[in-house]
Image (tube, rainbow, N blue to C red):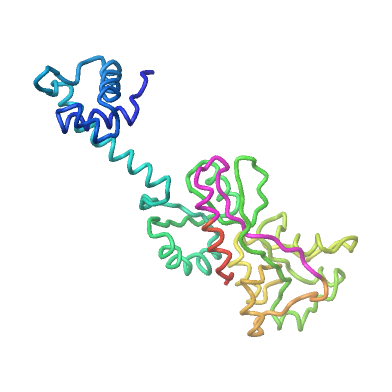
Amino acid sequence: MATLPSVESIQCFVAAARCLNFRAAARVVGLTPAALGKRIAQLEDQMGTRLFHRTTRKVELTQAGLTLLPTAQRLLVVAEDCIKAGRGEAELPHMDLNIGTRHELGLSWLVPMLPRLRREHPHITFHLYFGSGPDLELRTRSLEIDCAISSRKVQDPRIDALRIHNEAYVFVGAPDLMARTPLRGPQDAPALTLIDAHADTPLLRYFLDAQQGSEAWHFERVLRMGTIAAIRALVLAGDGVAVLPLYLVQPDLDAGRLVRLMPSLPLHSDHFRLLFRTDDPRRSLYETLAQTMRDEPLR
């Protein structure tokens, strides 16, 4: 690989090309004429060609020098921009950022947050992708999306995570259903339907894992609905009971559309996290976004 010329040598060349006088050019760049002449000679050696015709009476650019001049001038502009950027004085470049999120969380929390994100980060165009937890993790890993908001505990060393919000859970049912078929303990579970995301009952785990040493809970049947919005709809209709995020059902609890089951038994909580690749150089941006998101209450 060829050795690149120094910015200082390019600066000397541009000054000499503008002045067509090495003594005057040396004053412009703050060097002695001998030092400037040495820089020009080194640059010519690197280029493998003469850049100036010099006589005792005048200095002229060669054809190679004329060809080099506009590119050299652009390089100095870019070098100045580099210094400004390093000092934090330059405008941030425009960026597209793809954020993955769950459907319910995206609509209730992230979409309403977009105006604030745009105000605080005008150089970023925000795009949203909606998917499930495993899908979001996979797409973040494969760089199909830049980052994702998920409550999944990620074990992949290629994925980093910043905590955003605590996610509390509650065990809920419709008042009419609970009046007919109360749930006072595991002995009442066989008379009720459990509604959960999939066959492993991941939402119920927030309840069961907090009941150390308690009896097993066996429900009449388990309905698998895939998303918490669908689970909430069926619980509101009185089709069964479920563990759901508190932020999602708090309005239903306040309005009496749902009641909290086994309120004296605590449930484990989780955290929403902002996921991104560990090798993504934009960590400082994600830390800023995570702080903004922490300031926005879940809803």
257 displayed left or right of 145:
right
Image point (38%, 52%), residue name:
89
Seen from the viewer's position, the closer of residues 248 and 276 is 276
The foreground one among 98 and 281 is: 281
Of the 4 image quadrants, the one containing the C terminus is: bottom right
Q: Where is residue 290 in the image (x, y as percent from the top left)?
A: 56, 58
- Judge by depth and name the residue closer to the eye, 177 or 155: 155
- In the picture, which quadrant includes the N terminus? top left
Name the residue at 19% across, 32% down.
Answer: 24
Report the label total: 0
Would residue 100 be counted in the magenta stretch?
no
Residue 93 vs residue 40: left or right? right
Residue 12 occupies quadrant:
top left
Q: In which quarter of the image is residue 195?
A: bottom right
Residue 71 vs 258, above or below: the answer is above
Measuring from the top left, give residue 231's x and y in whole percent: 63, 67
Q: Magenta stretch? A: 266-287
As displayed, is residue 33 above or below residue 113?
above
| Residue 198 versus residue 65 in the image, above or below | below
The residue at 60%/44% (across/down) is 159
- The image shows residue 41 at horizontal and vertical percentages of 27, 18
Question: What's the residue at 42%, 48% (across, down)?
Answer: 87
| Foreground pick, 39 / 223 | 39
